[in-house]
Image: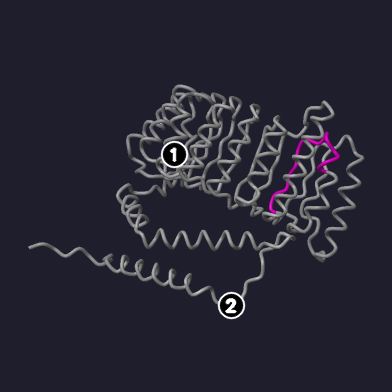
Amino acid sequence: KVADLSDIFTGRLISEIPQALSAVCDALITVPSLVELNLSDNAFGGRSADPMVPFLTQHRTFSVLKLNNNGLGVTGGLIIAKALLDSAEASKAAGQKSALRTVICGRNRLENGSAPKWAEAFKAHGGLVEIRMFQNGIRMEGVEALAQGLSGCPDLEVFDLQDNTCTERGSRAVAQALPSWPKLRELNLSDCLLKPKGGLAVATVLARGVNPKLETLKLTYGEFDNRAIDLIAKAITDHWPNLTTLELNGNIGDPEDECIQNVKDALAGHGHEDALDELDDMMDPAEFEAEEEEDDHPAVKEAEELDKAEAEAEAEAEKDDGEPAATTTKSAPSTIAQQVDKAADELADLLGKVSLGEKPSQS
């Protein structure tokens, strides 16, 4: 049986939701035939995570949990992940295997703060088949934790991490975990900013054929370069006869490059000529190199560090109800302000050297 409770709290006062959610979830505890709970698209925030805990910890036969677009935040994410971990440990203590197979928890602002606890829960359940954690603001440290946790799930078939941030560190962790998932059918790392080295790390492992059942591979806007794309072509030829969906748009290269043709030929060899998506937004290698040089400028790095520090401070200040802390009108400490001004001035000097006019003709 399926309890589809998605988008049921529209128009309700926020103060009414926890009590109503508690009543519903508590009633479901005594329904042993329940296999799926779907509470997606209810923007109740972290304040409504606690009412779900009794169900998550006591009902140990449901297999599908859908909590997509609930605004859980870091605090709510921690509560849900801990409840799932407690459930797995209780099942183990009772000599039972976990029944949980699918967790969909995208668009919830889970961020790095809750990622390690989710990783613990995933590893404890062990038999997970489908994990979708897209659009959660998870950065490389959190991605690393998730990949390590999921490496303990050998039956994993779907891993969707779209629109989080891998960079090289997170990408290497995913690459190291790939051999643990021989049944993997779908991998979505689109919009995850793997960077060239990270993309190469993932592509190198994929080319070894550790995931022979792959059917869907989404790698858009990850800064994969021609080396990584060539390895993808090799993997298709040697290991992926069933790959029917491949998304590579937004990476580094030209649609007419040899590596792209190699991919097309590899797909055609298996009768899947239409598997590749449109490549209408590829990044010119020369432009990419120029952007990389600009990103390496000390002023840019300093500004990024300040942004990161500010984001971490906001996460620490997040209220227990999962909502972001109210902004304050007080000015930042003078030292921080001076650093921001300095970074801005240096960045302005850098950009001032860029000419947007036509190149003067040479006589």
Q: State yes or no: residue 57 in magenta.
A: yes
Q: Is residue 155 left or right of residue 244?
A: right
User: Label 1 crowding class (10 Å Cα cut-off): few <14, some 14-19, many 20+?
Assistant: many
Residue 190, x across and y down, in percent: 52, 44
Residue closest to the far top:
238
Q: Quadrant of residue 12?
A: bottom right
The N terminus - image quarter = top right
Residue 49 included in the magenta stretch of the image: no
- In this rendering, the answer to whether 280 lies above or below 9 is above
Report whether 126 appears left or right of 160: right
Amino acid tagged 1 = Gly
Q: Position of residue 125 (x, y in %)?
A: 72, 33
Q: Residue at left 44%, top 24%?
A: 237
200, above or below 279, in the image: above
Say what secondary structure mark 2 lies in.
loop
Please state which amino acid type lies under the numbered disc 2: Lys
The type of colouring in the image is one colour
Name the residue tied to disc 2: 330
Position of 167 compared to 1: left or right? Answer: left
Range shown magenta: 56-69
Q: Earlier in the sequence, mark 2 or mark 1?
A: 1
Where's residue 193, x and y in %? 47, 47
